[in-house]
Amino acid sequence: MQLKKYLAASFAALLLTGASLANAATPIDVTWNPSGAGITTAGAFTFDNVLINTYSSIDITGGGTAFSEQGFAKLVTFSNNGIGTGSPDFGAPGGTPYSLYIQFTATGTQTAGVPSTGTFSTLDFSLLGASGVTTFTPNGVGVFSATGGPTVTLATGHLSSGTTTLSSTFQPSAQILTTFAPNPAFAGFFVNPNALTQLDLTAAFTNTNSVITQFDLGGGNFRLSLNGGGGNATLSAVPEPDTYGMLLAGLGLFAFIARRRGQKAA
């Protein structure tokens, strides 16, 4: 009877932990107020998904095993339950045009093959806001620069985990989990959750041949320039510390039971 009771408790702890982790990965409704950052007169809106356009360059070096990426991810359209709720370029809802975009740098490694799979090693970003419409223009070798109004840093983040696919058919894609830390200086922008709440940001990108240009850098190195690739991003709640504690307690209880059963068998 005691063994059954311990097993029941262990399974209950693990099931509860699993439910909490699953909920944490579920996109949440987020409310932002662009006028609270002073970049527009547009009012607050609620969203659970963001459409993103990517302007970046991926340098593949070292015989094709290492890559670095830098560029911009423009937040184009916000939606909630599939219905559009905000569009910065058009000043929606009900305000002057403005820009929200991510400036990022990343490094990683890839494996041989078609498609070539890989993993991000680092990724750091800042969410920037600016008045007016920001444009992203490549120079002669595919590296982009941003032109627009003065920016404010609304949030920052770094890689939690990430994978990528770099194919010789030039269709790079990526799935990335990052942290998302709002800047408390712009508390008026982050309505719900507030500026003191840490979140997870999950992004997925798939880029077709039509937006990719290859530049031969010489020596077996080359660059992929992504001019307006597509993707989307969602925000989710960070699991509470006690969630991880429950998981560890459940696993520890299993180990204890297994050891007791081994001793009885001996």
Image: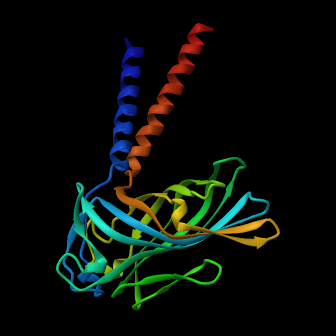
Indicate whether 135 appears above or below 246: below
Residue 131 percent across, percent down from the top left: 33, 88
- The quadrant of the image that shows the N terminus is top left
Q: Position of residue 187 (x, y in %)?
A: 29, 78
- Residue 133, percent across and down? 36, 85
Residue in view at x 24 percent, y 83 percent: 35
Residue at (50% x, 32% y) in the render: 252
What's the residue at 43%, 61% (across, down)?
A: 231
Looking at the image, which is closer to me, 7 or 16?
16
Determine which quarter of the picture holds residue 173: bottom right
Of the pair 33 and 252, the residue shown nearer to us: 33
In the image, 143 versus 21, the foreground residue is 143
Q: Is residue 164 left or right of residue 14?
A: right
Residue with the most extreme bottom position: 150
The residue lying toward the viewer, choosing from 64 and 240, is 64
Q: Quadrant of the C terminus?
A: top right
Relative height, residue 73 to residue 206 (above, below): below
Q: How is the image coloured?
A: rainbow
- Please tell me whether residue 10 is drawn above or below residue 209 in the rendered image: above
Q: Is residue 49 left or right of residue 81?
A: right
Residue 96 percent across, percent down from the top left: 23, 86
View extreme (top): residue: 265
The residue most toward the right is 219
Extreme left residue here?
Answer: 94
Residue 242 located left or right of residue 251 = left
